[in-house]
Image: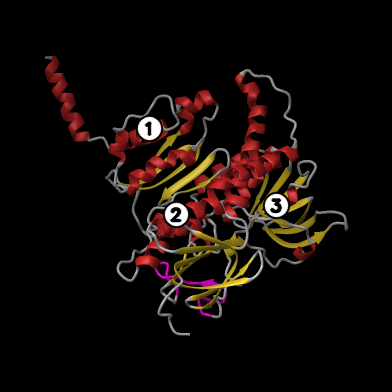
Amino acid sequence: MSKPRKFDRNLIVFGAGAAGLVSAYIAAAVKAKVTLVEAGAMGGDCLNTGCVPSKALIKCARVAQQARDAHKFGVALDKPKIDFPAVMAHVRNSIAAIEPHDSVERYTGLGVEVLQGRARLVDPWTVKISLNAGGEQTLTARAIILATGAEPLVPPLLGLDRIQYVTSDTLWDNFARLPQVPDSLLVLGGGAIGCELAQAFARLGTRVTLVEKADRLLPLEDRDVSDAVQQSLRASGVTVLTAHEARAFESGNAESTGGSVRLHSADGEQTLDFDHLLLALGRRARVSGFGLEELGIVAEGKLHTDPYLRTRHPHILAAGDLVGPYQFTHMASHQAWYAAVNGLFGDFKKFAVDYSLVPRAVFVDPEVASAGLTEQQARERNITYEVTRYGIDDLDRAIVDGTAQGFVKVLTAPGRDKILGVAIVGEGAAELIAEFVLAIKHGLGMNKLLSTIHIYPTMAEANKYAAGNWKRAHAPARLLRWLERFHRWRRG
């Protein structure tokens, strides 16, 4: 089909997760005629099965742990009793409270046409929408943004098809029906999702075993960060088995949700029993059923975009988890700006996505947050660097709060105060990292961080003290020797 002379819409967006919502919002804000199509729940994975429910569960688990630790502060409490249906109710209520932010009503009020149905590309400019309420609608658009998200990876492991496993998508509905906290849980995968949920369920009273094929957790982080997370999980009661590979599963009886798994490690084979199985092995782009293969946008399950987020058809762009390389909600929102602007105005001016600074966090306790280069990335890229550390165990606020563990680690250019990367392990690390993200983004070095007043006593002082450690290591030795002689002369 040839390109239409006229179009029904300036922009059609597939998917109402973070990338789709932000893309549609930006288009409406600049007065483009935009249609947003979503077959499932508004808000996508983050609201319904990802960030929001997991953080709500983590909060419940943290409260339970705080109750256990209350005696350390002179407060005697009974052992916490976990009302698991009430925990899951808190998860549902949290989603319900945030739903209006992503609702059809809100986006309609912002000027976005929202159609609830499944969109499919008929040709590069035409979209056919099978409406949830029945019937079809066909629209043409000058630009199209694909924001269909990702789905949990389920490996072809022997016997897995006979096990009633859950993923980060299906856990919430499945576990909402349980009368009590799961007795035992096997978690496959030592990435962010696996670590967060393993610790949360352990703190709620589940016997949790986490299995990771690699020799350490969170393999994208530096080893000292991974080691800190492994230590915190074990302190929470999680049995952590790294360098263990799941080989095969055997199901339990017909009424059981559990089974057993055969693991392989350097020490040989072993078998573990479990009541429930959680697969947390990563997520893959959701590409099927949208007409992408027929148009050559997807080949062998892979979607490729250029630095401007354009597919092989330049007016069809993609954003969010569908694209990667970082499957974070904040990255989806970041990419959405580029997709919307390039889709609407790319014929006149286009912008390459900036991936130079992508902060990330793992919401275990204590939290982990990183931004910029890690040490292992610097070594792989032959980038020279210096490391400055500050131990949070020395921080006044952390000591009085009983959270005196973790560290701030800063990578700087040799002999300069330019910040190349930061890793923080500690209470509120995901909040503390924001100061460093701002500093790196705007070229503010350690000297400016040190000269900024930080309220006492706060956790944020850890950032300043890290800068102070850098300053002491780079004190001007010759000047200080001269000053020593100057003050001796002044004394007479």
Q: Is residue 205 in view?
A: no
Q: Of all residues shown, which one is farthest toward the top?
A: 492
Q: Of all residues shown, which one is farthest toward the right?
A: 254
- Magenta stretch contains residue 398: no
Q: Which residue position is annotated with label 2?
A: 376
Q: Which of marks 2 and 1 is nearer the N terminus?
A: 2
Which is more toward the observer, 327 or 238?
A: 327
Say if 202 sits above or below 318 in the image.
above
Say if 222 sits above or below 281 in the image.
above
| Residue 92 image point, x, y percent | 67, 44
In the picture, measured across the screen, residue 382 lies left or right of residue 491, that is right
In the picture, measured across the screen, residue 449 lies left or right of residue 40, that is left
User: What segment is highlighted magenta in the picture?
Assistant: 295-311
| Secondary structure category for the residue under label 2 | helix
Q: Distance between the residues labelled 2 and 1?
A: 24 Å
- Magenta stretch contains residue 309: yes
Q: How far apart are marks 2 and 3 (CA)?
A: 34 Å
| Residue 452 image point, x, y percent | 31, 32
| Secondary structure category for the residue under label 1 | helix
Residue at figure coordinates x 47%, y 32% from the top left: 392
Q: Residue 171 carries which label?
A: 3
Q: Which residue position is annotated with label 1?
A: 465
